[in-house]
Amino acid sequence: MKYLLTILLSLFSLTAIATVKDTVATITVRDSNHNVTGYQAIIVERKDTTKIEIPAYVAKQMILDLMSGDSAKAQLAIVYDMFKATEKKTVMQDSMLKAYQIKNQTYAKQILLYKEKEAQYINYTKDLKKDVKKAKVKNHLATGAGMLLVLAGLLFLFVSAGK
Protein backbone atom coordinates (compact mmCIF):
# COMPACT_ATOMS: atom_id res chain seq x y z
CA MET A 1 0.00 0.00 0.00
CA LYS A 2 2.82 2.40 0.87
CA TYR A 3 4.66 1.58 -2.32
CA LEU A 4 1.53 2.15 -4.40
CA LEU A 5 1.14 5.58 -2.82
CA THR A 6 4.81 6.30 -3.56
CA ILE A 7 4.39 5.36 -7.20
CA LEU A 8 1.21 7.42 -7.63
CA LEU A 9 2.71 10.48 -6.02
CA SER A 10 5.91 10.15 -7.99
CA LEU A 11 3.88 10.39 -11.20
CA PHE A 12 1.99 13.52 -10.15
CA SER A 13 3.22 16.61 -8.42
CA LEU A 14 2.01 17.37 -4.89
CA THR A 15 -0.47 20.22 -4.27
CA ALA A 16 -1.09 21.69 -0.81
CA ILE A 17 -3.61 24.22 0.50
CA ALA A 18 -2.75 26.09 3.68
CA THR A 19 -5.24 27.38 6.24
CA VAL A 20 -4.38 30.60 8.05
CA LYS A 21 -5.95 31.64 11.33
CA ASP A 22 -5.79 35.29 12.32
CA THR A 23 -7.20 37.20 15.28
CA VAL A 24 -9.33 39.86 13.65
CA ALA A 25 -10.86 41.77 16.53
CA THR A 26 -11.47 41.87 20.22
CA ILE A 27 -15.02 42.55 21.38
CA THR A 28 -15.57 44.34 24.68
CA VAL A 29 -18.71 43.22 26.52
CA ARG A 30 -20.51 45.91 28.58
CA ASP A 31 -23.59 45.77 30.81
CA SER A 32 -26.52 48.22 30.85
CA ASN A 33 -24.52 50.74 32.94
CA HIS A 34 -21.73 50.70 30.33
CA ASN A 35 -19.37 48.82 32.66
CA VAL A 36 -16.92 46.41 31.02
CA THR A 37 -17.79 42.82 31.93
CA GLY A 38 -15.41 40.95 29.64
CA TYR A 39 -13.53 40.64 26.41
CA GLN A 40 -14.10 38.23 23.56
CA ALA A 41 -11.56 37.57 20.82
CA ILE A 42 -12.95 36.69 17.41
CA ILE A 43 -10.87 34.33 15.33
CA VAL A 44 -11.64 34.28 11.67
CA GLU A 45 -10.53 31.43 9.46
CA ARG A 46 -9.77 32.13 5.90
CA LYS A 47 -8.57 29.71 3.33
CA ASP A 48 -5.50 30.46 1.34
CA THR A 49 -6.19 29.44 -2.23
CA THR A 50 -2.61 29.71 -3.32
CA LYS A 51 -1.50 26.40 -4.74
CA ILE A 52 1.96 25.14 -3.94
CA GLU A 53 3.40 22.77 -6.47
CA ILE A 54 6.22 20.44 -5.47
CA PRO A 55 8.18 18.55 -8.10
CA ALA A 56 7.59 14.80 -8.26
CA TYR A 57 11.10 13.83 -7.19
CA VAL A 58 10.78 16.06 -4.07
CA ALA A 59 7.39 14.53 -3.26
CA LYS A 60 8.86 11.07 -3.74
CA GLN A 61 11.75 11.91 -1.40
CA MET A 62 9.29 13.32 1.18
CA ILE A 63 7.25 10.09 1.07
CA LEU A 64 10.37 7.96 1.42
CA ASP A 65 11.48 10.07 4.37
CA LEU A 66 8.05 9.75 5.99
CA MET A 67 8.08 5.97 5.49
CA SER A 68 11.58 5.67 6.93
CA GLY A 69 10.44 7.78 9.88
CA ASP A 70 7.48 5.43 10.43
CA SER A 71 9.76 2.40 10.31
CA ALA A 72 12.15 4.11 12.72
CA LYS A 73 9.25 4.71 15.12
CA ALA A 74 8.27 1.03 14.85
CA GLN A 75 11.86 -0.03 15.49
CA LEU A 76 12.03 2.34 18.45
CA ALA A 77 8.90 0.77 19.92
CA ILE A 78 10.39 -2.71 19.50
CA VAL A 79 13.69 -1.65 21.03
CA TYR A 80 11.81 -0.04 23.93
CA ASP A 81 9.88 -3.28 24.52
CA MET A 82 13.16 -5.20 24.42
CA PHE A 83 14.66 -2.74 26.91
CA LYS A 84 11.74 -3.22 29.30
CA ALA A 85 12.02 -7.01 28.95
CA THR A 86 15.75 -6.77 29.67
CA GLU A 87 15.05 -4.67 32.76
CA LYS A 88 12.53 -7.25 34.00
CA LYS A 89 15.05 -10.02 33.32
CA THR A 90 17.71 -8.12 35.26
CA VAL A 91 15.36 -7.63 38.21
CA MET A 92 14.50 -11.34 38.18
CA GLN A 93 18.18 -12.30 38.01
CA ASP A 94 18.97 -9.94 40.90
CA SER A 95 16.22 -11.49 43.01
CA MET A 96 17.48 -14.97 42.14
CA LEU A 97 21.03 -13.95 43.11
CA LYS A 98 19.77 -12.63 46.45
CA ALA A 99 17.87 -15.87 47.03
CA TYR A 100 20.99 -17.92 46.24
CA GLN A 101 23.10 -15.72 48.52
CA ILE A 102 20.64 -16.27 51.37
CA LYS A 103 20.62 -19.99 50.61
CA ASN A 104 24.43 -20.05 50.60
CA GLN A 105 24.53 -18.25 53.96
CA THR A 106 22.03 -20.75 55.37
CA TYR A 107 24.16 -23.65 54.15
CA ALA A 108 27.28 -22.10 55.69
CA LYS A 109 25.45 -21.76 59.04
CA GLN A 110 24.30 -25.39 58.81
CA ILE A 111 27.86 -26.54 58.12
CA LEU A 112 29.14 -24.62 61.16
CA LEU A 113 26.38 -26.11 63.32
CA TYR A 114 27.22 -29.63 62.11
CA LYS A 115 30.90 -29.01 62.90
CA GLU A 116 29.98 -27.84 66.40
CA LYS A 117 27.72 -30.87 66.79
CA GLU A 118 30.55 -33.17 65.68
CA ALA A 119 32.96 -31.53 68.14
CA GLN A 120 30.43 -32.07 70.94
CA TYR A 121 30.01 -35.73 69.93
CA ILE A 122 33.79 -36.17 70.01
CA ASN A 123 33.94 -34.60 73.49
CA TYR A 124 31.07 -36.78 74.71
CA THR A 125 32.77 -39.87 73.26
CA LYS A 126 36.04 -39.00 75.04
CA ASP A 127 34.20 -38.47 78.31
CA LEU A 128 32.33 -41.76 77.88
CA LYS A 129 35.59 -43.61 77.15
CA LYS A 130 37.09 -42.19 80.36
CA ASP A 131 33.98 -43.22 82.29
CA VAL A 132 34.13 -46.74 80.80
CA LYS A 133 37.82 -47.05 81.79
CA LYS A 134 37.02 -45.88 85.32
CA ALA A 135 34.13 -48.33 85.54
CA LYS A 136 36.34 -51.19 84.30
CA VAL A 137 39.01 -50.31 86.87
CA LYS A 138 36.39 -50.17 89.62
CA ASN A 139 34.91 -53.45 88.41
CA HIS A 140 38.35 -55.13 88.37
CA LEU A 141 39.11 -53.75 91.82
CA ALA A 142 35.78 -54.87 93.17
CA THR A 143 36.18 -58.31 91.59
CA GLY A 144 39.75 -58.59 92.86
CA ALA A 145 38.79 -57.43 96.34
CA GLY A 146 35.86 -59.84 96.38
CA MET A 147 38.09 -62.72 95.34
CA LEU A 148 40.61 -61.79 98.03
CA LEU A 149 37.86 -61.70 100.64
CA VAL A 150 36.55 -65.08 99.51
CA LEU A 151 40.07 -66.55 99.56
CA ALA A 152 40.75 -64.94 102.93
CA GLY A 153 37.49 -66.35 104.25
CA LEU A 154 38.33 -69.81 102.89
CA LEU A 155 41.83 -69.57 104.29
CA PHE A 156 40.44 -68.54 107.65
CA LEU A 157 38.00 -71.42 107.60
CA PHE A 158 40.72 -73.78 106.50
CA VAL A 159 43.09 -72.58 109.23
CA SER A 160 40.44 -72.54 111.95
CA ALA A 161 39.10 -75.95 110.94
CA GLY A 162 42.58 -77.43 111.05
CA LYS A 163 43.22 -76.46 114.66
Image (spheres, rainbow, N blue to C red):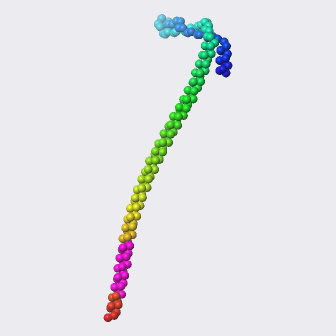
Please, is residue 94 above or below residue 44 in the view? below
Q: Residue furthest bottom?
A: 163
Image quarter in which the C terminus is found: bottom left
Q: Point out residue 154 in the picture as x, y percentages from the top left corner.
A: 36, 87
Q: Does 31 appear in magenta?
A: no
Q: Residue at x 62, y 15 (%)?
A: 60
The magenta stretch spans which residues? Answer: 135-154
Q: Point out residue 115 in the picture as x, y percentages from the top left corner.
A: 42, 56
Please, is residue 87 above or below residue 101 in the view? above
Question: Total number of numbered labels?
Answer: 0
Q: Does 150 appear in magenta?
A: yes
Image quarter in which the N terminus is found: top right
Q: Residue at x 61, y 8 (%)?
A: 52
Q: Residue furthest front?
A: 57
Q: Nearer the viewer, residue 24 or 63?
A: 63
Q: Quadrant of residue 159?
A: bottom left
Q: Nearer the viewer, residue 22 or 106?
A: 106
Q: Point out residue 133 in the picture as x, y percentages from the top left corner.
A: 37, 70
Q: Visible in this render: residue 82?
A: yes
Q: Visible in this render: residue 27?
A: no
Q: Residue at x 57, y 29 (%)?
A: 78
Please, is residue 52 above or below residue 76 in the view? above
Q: Point out residue 57 in the picture as x, y percentages from the top left corner.
A: 62, 13
Q: Residue at x 55, y 31 (%)?
A: 81
Please, is residue 51 above or below residue 70 in the view? above
